[in-house]
Image (cartoon, rainbow, N blue to C red):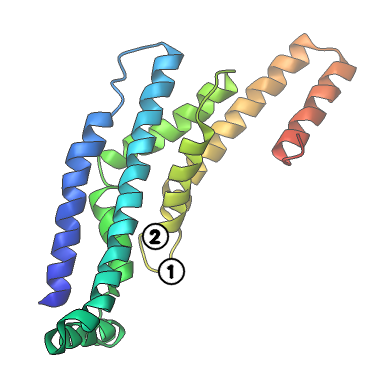
Amino acid sequence: MLYDGVCNLVAENLAELAKDEVFPAFPTGRSDDRMQQTQEGEMLLKALRRIWDDHIGSMSKLRDILKYMVCAWGLLCRVLTFIFRQDRVYTKAAEVPEIWDTGYILFWKHIIRPPIDQHIYSAILSQIQIEREGYVINRSAVKECVDVLLVLRVDGDGPSVYKRHLELAILRDSEAFYKGEGDRLVESCDAPEYLRRVSLVFYILAGKH
């Protein structure tokens, strides 16, 4: 009952955050203006990160409360703390994830889910493309969301959400972009200039710029 109750409370909180924070931040898709598209995508990515930080903070506070209750409330609290210390024992016997891992799973189920997931992936891909076109984006907003997707896993020890659902799309778009750039440079540059620009790209990709 205690395990299920905690899971239900976490799930309810995530569902409320999704309704209040994420859905209102969906890009409208009504504008061709790159600056507006950048701002809308950034708003969605920041909303995801806010929810993630709130979620992780809530899970940490939950653990702290259960830990310190034993000093304040005596026997009843010692019983509750004992129960939670049996998390690993209970979860193995019941074949369910430990509470902390359950928090990750619930975040994935309630936040990184249709239609939210596709909006998140599209926003990240769009931000990358917009920057390639020469506009300024908030790189930290993109990175912070990618970090969340790298932590989350659909199946225990399986690939991360990023690797399973986003990495291939980024690689595909990158291949198309650099192929197009290469074709354009072949047509517009002489050999020395072409080689100079290709070398610059290699330095950028290697993080040496």
Q: Position of residue 189 (x, y in %)?
A: 80, 12
Extreme residue in the right direction:
192
> On the rendered image, what quadrant is the C terminus found in?
top right
Q: Say how many tags the image has.
A: 2
Using the image as rendered, state which of residue 21 and residue 95 is in the foreground: 21
> On the rendered image, what quadrant is the N terminus found in?
bottom left
Q: Amino acid at mark 1?
A: Asp
Q: Position of residue 85 (x, y in %)?
A: 28, 84
Identify the residue shown where x is 34% and y is 58%: 56
Identify the residue shown where x is 42% and y is 50%: 148
Q: Which disc number belongs to residue 157?
A: 1
Residue 47 seen anywhere in this rendered image of the structure: yes
| Residue where numbered disc 2 is placed | 153
Using the image as rendered, state which of residue 74 and residue 79 is in the foreground: 74
Q: Secondary structure at mark 2?
A: loop
Disc 2 to disc 1, C-alpha distance = 7 Å
Mark 2 and 1 residues: CB-CB less than 8 Å, in contact?
yes
